[in-house]
Amino acid sequence: MSVRKLSIELPEVMIEAIEHRIDAGRYQSTSDVMRAAIDALLREEEAQDTQLDAVREQVRASLDDPRPNLSSAEMHKHIENLYAGHRG
């Protein structure tokens, strides 16, 4: 992996957070903190993309479902019947 130098401006609170992590020995440099932060961001975005894809698939499957749509009254009755069946 090639490496390039990058200059960024951050709020003081973020700079202090970076320095705190370095002072605590969790990281050796600002670059290490920033790499870890970007790695975490990329993992989080990938997880969100995966979740969004799953939701889209569920919506697609629901829209493609050949079963007839139920009115809210029909759905309410169906739920009541399910509940009554579980109560005994």
Image: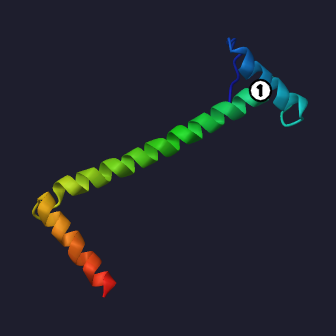
Residue at coordinates 71% horizontally, 30% vertically from top-left?
35
Q: Nearer the viewer, residue 33 or 24?
A: 24
The residue wearing badge 1 is 17
Image-based side of 21 in relation to 54, left or right: right
Q: Nearer the viewer, residue 71 or 17?
A: 71
Q: Residue 73 at what x, y percent from top left?
A: 13, 62
Q: Residue 70 at what x, y percent from top left?
A: 12, 61
- Location of the C terminus by quadrant is bottom left
Q: Secondary structure at mark 1?
A: helix
Residue at coordinates 64% horizontally, 36% vertically from top-left?
39
Q: Residue 34 at what x, y percent from top left?
A: 71, 27
Q: Nearer the viewer, residue 28 or 20?
A: 20
Residue at coordinates 82% horizontally, 31% vertically from top-left?
21
| Count of picture labels | 1
Residue 73 in sight in this render: yes
Question: Measured along the vertical axis of the image, is residue 54 above or below residue 31?
Answer: below
- Residue flagged by tag 1: what amino acid is it? Ala
- Location of the N terminus by quadrant is top right
